[in-house]
Amino acid sequence: MEEKKHSLDFVRQIVADDLANGKNDGRVVTRFPPEPNGYLHIGHAKSICLNFGIAQEFNGVCHLRFDDTNPTKEDQEYIDSIIQDVHWLGFDWKDKLFYASDYFEQLYQYAVQLIKVGKAYVCDLSADEIRHNRGTLTQAGNESPYRKRSVEENLDLFERMRKGEFKEGEKVLRAKGDMTSPNVNMRDPVMYRILHAEHHRTGNKWCIYPMYDWAHGQSDSIEKITHSICTLEFENHRPLYDWFVEQLGIYHPQQIEFARLNLTHTVMSKRKLLELVEKKIVEGWDDPRVPTISGLRRRGFTPEAIRDFAQRIGVAKVDNVIEVELLEHCLREDLNKRALRVMAVLNPLKVIIDNYPDGQVEELDAVNNPEDSSAGTRKVPFSKEIYIEQDDFMENPPKDFFRLAPGREVRLRYAYFLKCESVVKDPATGDIKELHCTYDLASKGGNSPDGRKVKATIHWVSAGQAIDGEVRIFEQLFEQLDPLKDLGVNEDFISRVNPKSLTLLKGCKMEPALADAKVGVSYQFERLGYFSLDPVFAAQGKKMFNRSVSLKAAWVKDKKG
Ligand code: ATP
Ligand code: MG
């Protein structure tokens, strides 16, 4: 896929045109406005790259604003994780960190202003009654009987709502829109509800909380956001946001909607992710199988790969679904350039080289990264006993198997030609215990001494110097392209979780260079994929590697030589 660096997407085109026309006095101010009710996912990354990217490219600023208007669902843990994730992705808001809760007083005053001009009223209907009276797409709504309350009564009731005189659900503040509007969002939307809940920042100061639709546009206005970029589902909220700022006579940000990111084989909404976490289907928000930023980081994704992904998928106005393979491809491309190559054997089979001197250990030269000559070489120990991959040997190979078999010769990467002489089996079970082989001293470095050819090169680890480790291999969390599609009425999406999404391999043998592997550093295990230490297990002193992504031809699928 070609990178499209030169043509602007439609959002950037709007910003460029506005700048060219001198709009907003040449200011470009965007924002990323997460609700701290969950961890960020790859969809958010698209929005982060767009908003912070535009600010960078057009010499503007991007605010980070927490839309913390629902204390019952929000938590400091989420705020901390969001801050970490945005930084990790490589973006900086400088001193422009804001909270909608900082505007609670201002929002309250704006509401009073609307009441005073007869554009908002206190309504005693229940949530169910309000929903019922709202009408449908084809049917107008019914006006609330409380719509005709006087300004004085509304001011009094609203103040008493704030003081905590009413129970939850007893009263709400609603905008006086138009119950016959074809846009349901304009039909007297709720602006405030009563919640006797402690807020993670404002404590017990408030017992009325603004609805998202009331808080969001005004927060943008207070911060003088020039381009308020959001996903398409807010397109039909825009008339309401416009109406609010016009009624208030305050600064009017321009809202631009783009298509949200959807990804195959996964779920992305925070509600669904929370369900997976709470039901312990996954290890937490940072499980390497979920598409959260923290999950991707733990799995071994790099910020560079995610930013590259965001650039490749682009920004459009029409919803679509991106294949998760593109995300994996971006990681592969990035790691191919910089990951150090090492050898590790995941399912070891012992090989004894009968004609190799007893007790001898030699150091062979191995290339650290063929894509980057500055990465140099390293020494890899070789000795009489080595491990190879169980999969690389077959006692009775089919025609298309070219690796080791009785009487057959292969190349050991960076080492020698190796020929299988005999197979030792467990007499009780018949399982293969070890192979006896011979090597050809003249083939040192893996070079043919006399022009004879071998059809396969396999990786190996010297038994005496190998370090032990564990490896986790992941498959997609859902085998379905869209795990939510055609769900039966009583069917839970959780029942569709792929039972093979996680495979733990114990007793893996790794070359000694991995003894001081560091968290956050990726390695290519030759022929097997890209791996990195799991930070959670590493903190417990465990050498557990996650496979971040397979090599192009996945080893588990590819049985050929
Ligand atoms: P979800 O629907 O996944 O639970 P959300 O939209 O409720 O997420 P917010 O915290 O409100 O989460 O999102 C913050 C910003 O991220 C919003 O501006 C939203 O438009 C954007 N965003 C959320 N999901 C996606 C997505 N899949 N693709 C692109 N942008 C997204
Ligand atoms: Mg939202």
Image (cartoon, rainbow, N blue to C red):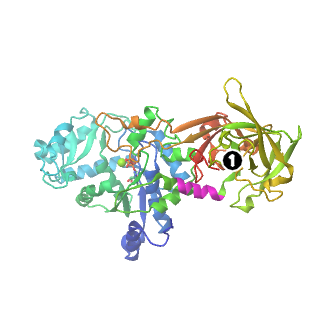
Residue 7 image offset from top left, x and y in percent: 45, 72
Residue 271 image offset from top left, x and y in percent: 38, 40
Mark 1: few/some/many CA within 10 Å (<14, 14-19, 20+): many
Q: Can residue 171 be seen by looking at this rendering? A: yes
Residue 397 higher or lower than 97, as above or below: above
Q: Is the residue at mark 1 in contact range of ligand 1, meaning its CB lies under 8 Å from it?
A: no
Most foreground residue, 312 or 121: 312
Query: Could you say which quadrant of the image residue 226 lies in?
Result: bottom left
Question: Which residue corresponds to the image point at 60% horizontal and 37% vertical from the top-left?
Answer: 536
Most foreground residue, 247 or 428: 428
Residue 216 image offset from top left, x and y in percent: 33, 52
Tell me if residue 334 is in the magenta stretch.
Answer: yes
Q: Which residue does the numbered mark 1 point to in the structure image? A: 403
The amino acid type, in three-letter code, at marker 1 is: Arg
Question: Which residue corresponds to the image point at 80% horizontal and 59% vertical from the top-left?
Answer: 451
Prevailing SS of the magenta stretch: helix
Residue 152 higher or lower than 331, as above or below: above
Element under disc 1: loop
Indicate left or right for 7 with 546 as reference: left
Residue 428 image offset from top left, x and y in percent: 69, 23
Residue 225 higher or lower than 394, as above or below: below
Most foreground residue, 202 or 336: 336
Q: What stretch is highlighted in magenta?
A: 328-337
Q: How many numbered marks have been drawn onto this rendered protein structure?
A: 1
Q: Can residue 91 be seen by looking at this rendering? A: no
